[in-house]
């Protein structure tokens, strides 16, 4: 346990069934939090069953759906009585197409989850935290793809840019309630989302050879930084956009 103030806090984590979300659930439980683990995939139930009874509440919800977002906040409050922390993380990668080739329905599909889902999560959780009147801490997941444009980043990159803007607005508007809002921009992480890119590229060492830390992150490494931002140790940090990328943005 690294952050004593996290003990007995209640967190919501979206995209909790896999990758970074699952790593943050694990880390927050180790810190003594109770966690509502939200995902569209049923396997979030198996993941939750692996923890001590009662520590993790699995919730199946589509973050792009307004009622579902209000529902996961209500279900968390019904079970744990409050929401102190929020990791707003669910996303999909979608098709990487040149802008001129991007079908509108695919652009909309990606933005529905990655932009609208992040907005709806912020709105529902902030309303609850404001009502509670005891402050809170929120971290949303963008990407280096939201900082640095790339060819074929038409849908994913533009959505991840929007996540940064939403986090800044939320931080500005809610500091007066004692709520801190930050955004992380991971580089490559070894999760199911990255697997297709790693598989097609083949030689991972070649892919990262110019990056100061020349490998993808283990999601636990990124989860450690998220946990710090959610903890009281980050009490002066709000409105920030932080790369967690092994130096990828430098190259
Ligand atoms: N893996 C990387 O290299 C990388 C790099 C930069 C940023 N990111 C970002 O990190 C975050 C976590 O990604 P990951 O790598 O762990 O991916 P992942 O695919 O392992 O996990 C994403 C989770 O989000 C869930 N999800 C997708 N759509 C959803 C919806 N509509 N409602 C609820 N849940 C939904 C999925 O079911 C999955 O469990 C994402 O925001 C992603 O964009 C990932």
Image (spheres, rainbow, N blue to C red):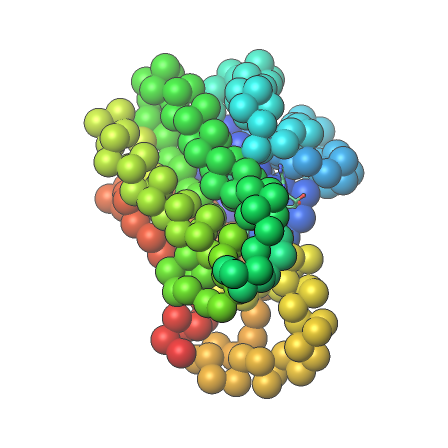
> Where is the C terminus found, in terms of image quarters?
bottom left
Position of residue 99 relative to residue 239, above or below, is below
Position of residue 132 relative to residue 10, above or below, is above
Q: Position of residue 248 (x, y in %)?
A: 44, 72
Position of residue 242 relative to residue 214, above or below, is above
Residue at (63, 32) in percent of width and height: 62
- Does residue 25 appear anywhere in the picture? no
Residue at (66, 77) in percent of width and height: 201
Q: Position of residue 160 (x, y in %)?
A: 45, 51
Residue at (36, 15) in percent of width and height: 131
Decide which of 165, 76 is in the foreground and name it: 165
Which of the 4 quarters of the picture holds residue 17? Answer: top right
Position of residue 144 relative to residue 127, above or below, is below
Which of the 4 quarters of the picture holds residue 76? Answer: top right
Residue at (65, 68) in percent of width and height: 197
Q: Position of residue 43 (x, y in %)?
A: 76, 40
Q: Is residue 40 left or right of residue 34?
A: right
């Amino acid at each position: 346990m690294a952050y004593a103030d996290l003990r007995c806090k209640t967190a919501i984590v979206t995209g909790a069934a896999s990758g970074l979300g699952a790593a943050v659930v694990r880390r927050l439980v180790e810190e003594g939090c109770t966690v509502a683990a939200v995902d569209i995939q049923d396997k979030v139930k198996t993941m939750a069953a692996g923890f001590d009874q009662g520590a993790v509440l699995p919730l199946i919800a589509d973050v792009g759906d307004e009622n579902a977002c209000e529902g996961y906040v209500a279900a968390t409050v019904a079970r744990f009585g409050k929401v102190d922390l929020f990791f707003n993380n669910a996303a999909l990668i979608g098709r990487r197409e040149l802008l001129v080739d991007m079908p509108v329905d695919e652009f909309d599909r990606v933005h529905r989850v990655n932009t609208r889902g992040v907005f709806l999560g912020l709105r529902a959780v902030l309303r609850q935290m404001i009502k509670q009147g005891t402050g809170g801490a929120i971290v949303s997941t963008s990407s280096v793809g939201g900082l640095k444009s790339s060819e074929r980043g038409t849908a994913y990159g533009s959505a991840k840019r929007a996540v940064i803007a939403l986090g800044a607005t939320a931080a500005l508007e809610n500091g007066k309630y004692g709520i801190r809002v930050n955004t992380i921009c991971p580089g490559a992480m070894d999760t199911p989302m990255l697997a297709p890119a790693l598989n097609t590229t083949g030689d991972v060492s070649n892919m990262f050879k110019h990056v100061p830390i020349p490998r993808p992150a283990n999601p636990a490494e990124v989860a450690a930084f998220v946990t710090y931002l959610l903890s009281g140790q980050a009490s002066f940090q709000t409105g920030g956009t932080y790369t967690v990328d092994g130096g990828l943005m430098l190259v």
